[in-house]
Amino acid sequence: MLKPLLILLVLVTCTADATNIDSTSQQTVSNFWLYEDPSHHFNGQTVLSTPESSWRVIQQKNINLGYRNPTVWFKFELTNITEQTLSKLLDINYPLLDYVSLYFIKDDTAIPLMQTGDSLPYDSRNIDHPNFVTAIDLPPNKTMHYLLKIKSNAPIQSEIKVWSPDEFQSYYRSKASLTFLYLGILFSAALFNLVVFIFIKERTYLVYGLYAGTFALLMASQDAILFEYVFPNHPKYHNWSQLILGCAAISLTMLFNLFFLKLDPKNKGRSIYLMSFVPVFILLIAFVFNYVIAIKLALISTLIMLPACFFIGLYHSKNSINRAFYIGAWMWFVIGFVIFALARLGLIPFNTFSNHAIQLGSTLELLTFAIALARRLHIEKETRIQAQQIIIDSSRQSVKLQEELLHNATHNDVTGLPNRNNFCKWLDRNLTENVPFTLVLMRLSRIAELDKTLGRDISNYALEQFATVLNREVQSIEGIQCLNTQEDFYAANLSNSTLGFVLKTDNHQALKAKLISLNKTLNSPIVINDMEIEPWVISGYACYPEDAQNAQTLLRNAGIAVERAHQCDNQISNYHKIIDTYDERRLLLVNELKAAIAQNKMALYYQPLINTKDNTIMGAEALIRWPHDEYGMIMPDEFIEIAEQTGIIQALSLWVIKHALQQLRIWKKYNPEFMMSVNISTHNIQDSHFIEAVSFLMNDHKGLAENIILEITETQMMGDTQHALKNLWALNELGFNLAIDDFGTGYSNLGYLKKLPANELKIDKSFMLNLEDDPQNQVLVQTAIDMAHNLGMSVVAEGVESERCYSLLKTMGCDLCQGYHFSLPIPVDQFDRILDKPAKI
């Protein structure tokens, strides 16, 4: 137990002098006799009979005994030194004392003048005022003796002032104006911050608004304003309001500092966050155990927590733009509160300054934080404007890059002409039953030779010149079809050496004459680096609907014709079934494919997927092959089309998925995170029966779907979008991961891609060719990677064939790579040997 009297009381052995009272407006009693009654047995009469030696003398203008358990008695004398009777008001100016009794001593008899206290109803006061005030009359040239009894759970502290009635009213009227102005400022700040919170939904303003409002109510309770106006007949509510509001204010102070400095409650702000719960435990102590103990704990813990919160926030706000405001605001509040708390604990004198130190400190704190929050609003506004401008600029750049990406996805990067996918879509849109079309293919036969002997740059230049001349010359041919009126494109780039165009004609004789003339023009030597190079252009054509009934077949048949052109006069050939060497083989494969699936004569080869972060094998792509007894190894490019056209594709896809699952189960035992990629056809995602069959298949392979990635090409997804999207989501709900394959080669709708349940995007291998030396290609690949990451997808680059390309992709942030640089597609036994080696490849 602190012994504040050892510090604050001036103990003397002489008698205390009377306080002289004259006609001045206000005087403070400064001489007292003090007696402590720990038994609480004395009353106003019996205490006068105690020996003089039991009373101690205090000679100072304020009483501050801190928290004292005994009942405390004070004797003091007032001497009227004037020649007239003085009517005065005796003011005990600390409104939180529980029980206050004032007696007038006459002829050794204690006559009660006032019986009041804040543990009694408010109307127990002699005068309607928050302080304990009573009227007294002082006869001329006489000394009057008074006895004061104080018993309180609050700190025993006060000044006893003697006022003239007019000055008393004038002083407290001014003080009340300042108090209500102060409370008005606090409530205005609370309301303003709550309104700001409603509009911007920033919790800092909510907490600060609640803190300012709660603190205003606490100050109103401290000055007995709530007691006077809210619950004058319920002193118990008045006493509890101080503890509850005080604890709430401290908790909100902790939370405000946490949010103001933007500290993570689970990391740097954990200690402040935990301290915000201390007042809650203090309230529990008050309700369960003892109110007085809780009050003392609240003051002591606050004295500890406020500086602790300040220094913790100071430490973690080293780089905060609000640090200066934080230090300034806290400095005012901590100084004010420490002075206030020390006065309550009886460690420093009680006076007007110490009694109002917290109001002064909180006002300065409020002003500082208000400036900080206003500045923060301004900075956030400027930041939002800048962010919006960045978004606008980024959107413009994104639109420009998407347009460029779209252009490159539909045009050849060497010639600038429409590419094969673009051309096929044009054919699909324009082939009609009643209009004859002729598709002409022209091939630069020496392109491969130029590439191998003189290099890629020379071969690209030759192709570019060839394309420029062809696109210009065909414009004058009657019946030529324009592929793009905005760009004046009449020819399309169908492969690295082949270009094509369409004529609306079925006159073979006239067509052949035109092609002979065109071939002669195109076979003119190309001058490169002072060298004349013969192009060796050959031509082939097929007619619609005579030779084919759809775009794909028309392209195929024209391709067969151009392959035979070098055997023909003038290097020009037209399609006829007689020259279609693939027909007999195709019929044989159609008949045998279904049996090969049923008899498990198909085979899966595996190409590893490499994690760019640690260069380890994290999965494989399962690629189907057909080991044919007569034709040897048949690649999927040949029999997939057969399967799709004959309706066997569903059985083939299910066979691949089933055997991939069987092998995955084995490899997953060694690596639970091993992923298996499997290609499925557009016919699969359009067929709901396929989804049902896959679901049934997974009954025997539970828990493996999450390790399977189903790959669907970008172009395939652009068909019956609603039905396909429904089935893709059905596969996703079965647990499969979905990948967009060959990204960048199709004419995709980027808005539609966002709706796909895709987890992965595979950049087409055509973008990997010469990637390390092609800045434009690098921009497109980087854009695709960034777009995929922004959509939450991982990125796989296929067709990686060099270490330089792989290193560049790693720096771009690509997640996975596959290609010949790491391994060809290999049988399962060879793949097992790769897995048995060290993890890095």
Image (cartoon, rainbow, N blue to C red):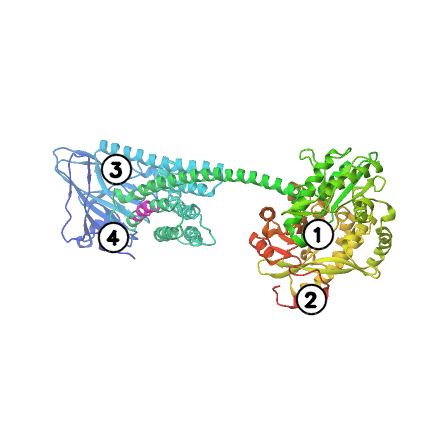
Q: Is residue 173 left or right of residue 273?
A: left
Say which label, 4 or 3, has the lower sequence index: 4
Q: Amino acid at mark 2?
A: Asp
In the rendered structure, which disc, 2 or 1, sits on the residue that comes first in sequence?
1
Q: Quadrant of the C terminus?
A: bottom right
Pointer 2 with pointer 1, Cβ within 8 A:
no
- Secondary structure at badge 3 equals strand
Whether residue 744 appears in this view of the structure is no
User: According to the image, label 1 marks what residue?
Assistant: 448
Residue 832: mark in rendering: 2
User: SS for tag 4?
Assistant: strand
Magenta segment includes 480: no
* Residue 782 appears left or right of 41: right
Is residue 332 within the magenta segment?
Answer: yes
Q: Residue at x 62, y 56 (%)?
A: 816
Residue 475 appears in the picture as rendered: yes
Distance Cα–Cα, label 2 vs label 3 = 101 Å
Q: Which mark is residue 36?
A: 4
The magenta segment is 330-338
Q: What whole-number distance in Å separates the C-alpha atoms at marks 2 and 1? A: 37 Å
Tell me the CA gap for discs 1 and 3: 115 Å
Check whether the beta carbons of the residues at disc 4 and disc 3 lie within 8 A of each other.
no
| Element type where label 1 sits in the image | helix
Question: First in sequence: mark 1 or mark 4?
Answer: 4
**Mark 1 or mark 3, which has the lower sequence index?**
3
Q: Local crowd at mark 1 within 10 Å, few (<14), some, or many (≥20)?
A: some
Q: Nearer the viewer, mark 1 or mark 3?
A: 1
- For label 3, the residue is 134
Front disc: 2 or 1: 1
Amino acid marked by disc 1: Ala
C-alpha gap between disc 4 and disc 2? 94 Å
